[in-house]
C-alpha cells in the first residue's frame, strides 16, 4: 500500500508541475543591421530586464591570445563616447537597478534589471556598449589587473580551483575548449591595443548579438526605442563559428595533479560527449540526475550514506555548444582509497549501461525535469537568459516552451544506450587531484 501511495504522489507532482508551466509569450524580429530582438511582456511586477548576448566566448580566441572574451566582459564596463569612465554601474545604481555580465566558452552575456520606468536607461547603456565603447590603454591596463585578481581569488587560491583547467586541457587537444575562459595572463599582457580593438570590431557587432527585453513594458513603445538606440550600429562581418572535430578517446588518459590549496584529495573522471544541441545531451542530463541528484540518488546513497567512504560524490553533464564534458567526482571519507571510489562510481555507471532503470525511478526523473523546467522560468531575468540561449545556440527561441517535450519523449532504453555509448572506461580522463604535500 505504501508503494502505491508513493507512486500516486509522484504522478500528482508531475501533474502539478505541468499545470504551473506557464507558456512564455514573446515577439521577435531583426533590425536591418542583423540585431535579433526578443520581447517578452510580463506585468506581474514593475521591473524590466534588458540583456544582450553576444555569440562570442573563449572558443573564438586563438592560441597565444586567450582570455579576450572574458576580458571584454570587464572592459565593456569602462565607458563610452557618451559615458564617462567608471559611470556605467553608477548610472544603473542611481536608476534603482542592478547589472552584471558573465562569459562562457560560447557566449558573453550582459544584463540590467531596472524599474520599468528606467527601460530607456537600460537600452541606452547597451547601445553605448555596442556602438562606441572606449577601448584605450588606461582601460586595458585597469581591467588587466582586475582579471588577474579574479584569477587569484577564483582559481589560483581556491581549493580545487584548477580542476576544470586540468580536465579540459586533457579532454580536448584540438578544440579551443582546451583552455579556460579566463585565459592566460601572459597572453593578455602581451596583447596590443589594436588587437583588442580588432576583437571588438569582429565579434561585438549587432549581427552577432541578441537583445532581449523582459518584464513590464509597452511593446510598441519599446520597439521604437530599440530602433532609435540600435539602428545606427553598423553591421559587422559575418561570423563563422569554429568547426573543429576532436579525435575520439580510445584509451583512458590517467594522470595526477597537485594542489597546494587542498588537504583532501579528489578523484575526477571526465568523458567527452556531444554538445547541447544533441538529443543525447538531454539523456546525459537525466543520467546524472539519477546518479547524483539529492540524498536519494544512487551515488550519494551508496557512497555517502551506506558505505560512508565518500564525503562528497557527484556526476554532471557540463554541456557546451560544440561538445560537452560528462564529469564524475568524489572526495574520500577518512582513509578510503581513491581507487575504491572510482570502483564504486564505475559500478553505478555500469548498471546504467546494462540495466533499465525502474518505471518508478523513471517517473521520478520525469517529475524532476518538469520541476526544473518550471523553476527555470520563474523570473524576468531568468527568462531573458533562457530566451537568449535558445535563439543564440538553437536558433529556436520557442525552445523555452518546448524543451520539456524533449525530456518527455526520452526512454529508459535511450538512457542505457547513451551510457553505453559515451561512458566507457577507455573513453575518459581519470584524474587524481592530490594535495601538493603528497608530491
Image: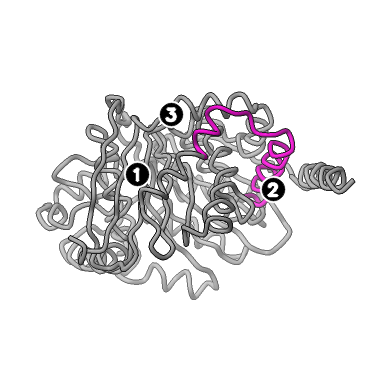
Circle 3 sits on which residue?
422
Q: Specify few, some or many for label 3: CA neighbours under 10 Å numbering under 14, 14-19, or 20 or more.
A: some
Q: For the residues carrying marks 2 and 1, which lies nearer the camera in this image?
A: 2
Q: Is residue 292 left or right of residue 181?
A: right
Q: Is residue 173 magenta?
A: no
Residue 60 seen in the figure: no
Secondary element under disc 3, as helix, strand or loop, is helix
Which secondary structure lies at badge 2?
helix
Whether residue 351 appears in magenta in the rendering, the answer is: yes
Describe the element under mark 1 as helix, strand or loop.
Answer: loop
Q: Earlier in the sequence, mark 3 or mark 2?
A: 2
Is 295 displayed left or right of 7 in the figure? left
Question: For residue 157, which numbered disc appears in the image?
Answer: none
Residue positioned 70% across, 63% down in the render = 45
Proximity of marks 2 and 1: CB atoms separated by less than 8 Å: no
> What is the crowding at mark 2: few (fewer than 14 residues within 10 Å), some, or many (at least 20)?
some
In the rendered view, would you say 338 is above or below 369?
A: below
Q: Position of residue 114 (x, y in %)?
A: 56, 65
| Quarter occupied by the C terminus | bottom left
Q: Quadrant of residue 14?
A: top right
Badge 1 crowding class, 10 Å Cα cut-off, few under 14, some 14 to 19, many 20 or more, is many
- Which quadrant is home to the N terminus? top right
Whole-number angstrom distance, CA of label 3 to CA of label 2? 27 Å
Residue bearing mark 1 = 105
Residue at x 40% of width, y 49% of height: 340
What distance separates the C-alpha of mark 2 from that of mark 1? 27 Å
Looking at the rendering, the stretch of residues picked out in magenta corresponds to: 348-377
Q: Which residue is mark 2?
A: 371
The one nearer the camera, 225 or 123, is 123
Q: Quadrant of residue 365?
A: top right
Q: Position of residue 211 (x, y in %)?
A: 49, 46
Closer to the camera: disc 3 or disc 1?
3
Amino acid at each position: 500500500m505504501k508503494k502505491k501511495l508513493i507512486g500516486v504522489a509522484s504522478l500528482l507532482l508531475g501533474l502539478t508541475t505541468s499545470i504551473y508551466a506557464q507558456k512564455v509569450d514573446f515577439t521577435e524580429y531583426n533590425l536591418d543591421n542583423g540585431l535579433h530582438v526578443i520581447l517578452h511582456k510580463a506585468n506581474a511586477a514593475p521591473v524590466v530586464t534588458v540583456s544582450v548576448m553576444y555569440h562570442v566566448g573563449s572558443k573564438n580566441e586563438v592560441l597565444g591570445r586567450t582570455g579576450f572574451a572574458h576580458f571584454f566582459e570587464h572592459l565593456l564596463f569602462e565607458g563610452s563616447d557618451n559615458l564617462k569612465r567608471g559611470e556605467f554601474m553608477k548610472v544603473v545604481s542611481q536608476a534603482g537597478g542592478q547589472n552584471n555580465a558573465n562569459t562562457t566558452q560560447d557566449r558573453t552575456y550582459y544584463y540590467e534589471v531596472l524599474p520599468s520606468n528606467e527601460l530607456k536607461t537600460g537600452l541606452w547603456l547597451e547601445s553605448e556598449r555596442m556602438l562606441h565603447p572606449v577601448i584605450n590603454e588606461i582601460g586595458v591596463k585597469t581591467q588587466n589587473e582586475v582579471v588577474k585578481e579574479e584569477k587569484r581569488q577564483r582559481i589560483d587560491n581556491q581549493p580545487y580551483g584548477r580542476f576544470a583547467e586540468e580536465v579540459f586541457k586533457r579532454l580536448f587537444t584540438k578544440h579551443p575548449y582546451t583552455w579556460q575562459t579566463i585565459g592566460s595572463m601572459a597572453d593578455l599582457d602581451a596583447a596590443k591595443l589594436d588587437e583588442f580593438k580588432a576583437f571588438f570590431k569582429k565579434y561585438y557587432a549587432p549581427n552577432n548579438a541578441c537583445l532581449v527585453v523582459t518584464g513590464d513594458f509597452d511593446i510598441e513603445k519599446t520597439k521604437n526605442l530599440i530602433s532609435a538606440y540600435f539602428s545606427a550600429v553598423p553591421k559587422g562581418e559575418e561570423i563563422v563559428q569554429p568547426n573543429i572535430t576532436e579525435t575520439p578517446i580510445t584509451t583512458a588518459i590517467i594522470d595526477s595533479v597537485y594542489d597546494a590549496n587542498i588537504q583532501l584529495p579528489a578523484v575526477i573522471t571526465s568523458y567527452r560527449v556531444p554538445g547541447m544541441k544533441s538529443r543525447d545531451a538531454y539523456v546525459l542530463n537525466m543520467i546524472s540526475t539519477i546518479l547524483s541528484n539529492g540524498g536519494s540518488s544512487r551515488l550519494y546513497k551508496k557512497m555517502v550514506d551506506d558505505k560512508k567512504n565518500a564525503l562528497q560524490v557527484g556526476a554532471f553533464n557540463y554541456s557546451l555548444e560544440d561538445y560537452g564534458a560528462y564529469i564524475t567526482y568524489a572526495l574520500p571519507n577518512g582513509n578510503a582509497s581513491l581507487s575504491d571510489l572510482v570502483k564504486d562510481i564505475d559500478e553505478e555507471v555500469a548498471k546504467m549501461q546494462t540495466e533499465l532503470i525502474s518505471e518508478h525511478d523513471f517517473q521520478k526523473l520525469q517529475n524532476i525535469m518538469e520541476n526544473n523546467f518550471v523553476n527555470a522560468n520563474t523570473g524576468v531575468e531568468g527568462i531573458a537568459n533562457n530566451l537568449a540561449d535558445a535563439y543564440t545556440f538553437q536558433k529556436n527561441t520557442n525552445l523555452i516552451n518546448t524543451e520539456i517535450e524533449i525530456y518527455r519523449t526520452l526512454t529508459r532504453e535511450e538512457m542505457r544506450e547513451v551510457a553505453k555509448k559515451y561512458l566507457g572506461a577507455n573513453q575518459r580522463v581519470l584524474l587524481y587531484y592530490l594535495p601538493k604535500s603528497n608530491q
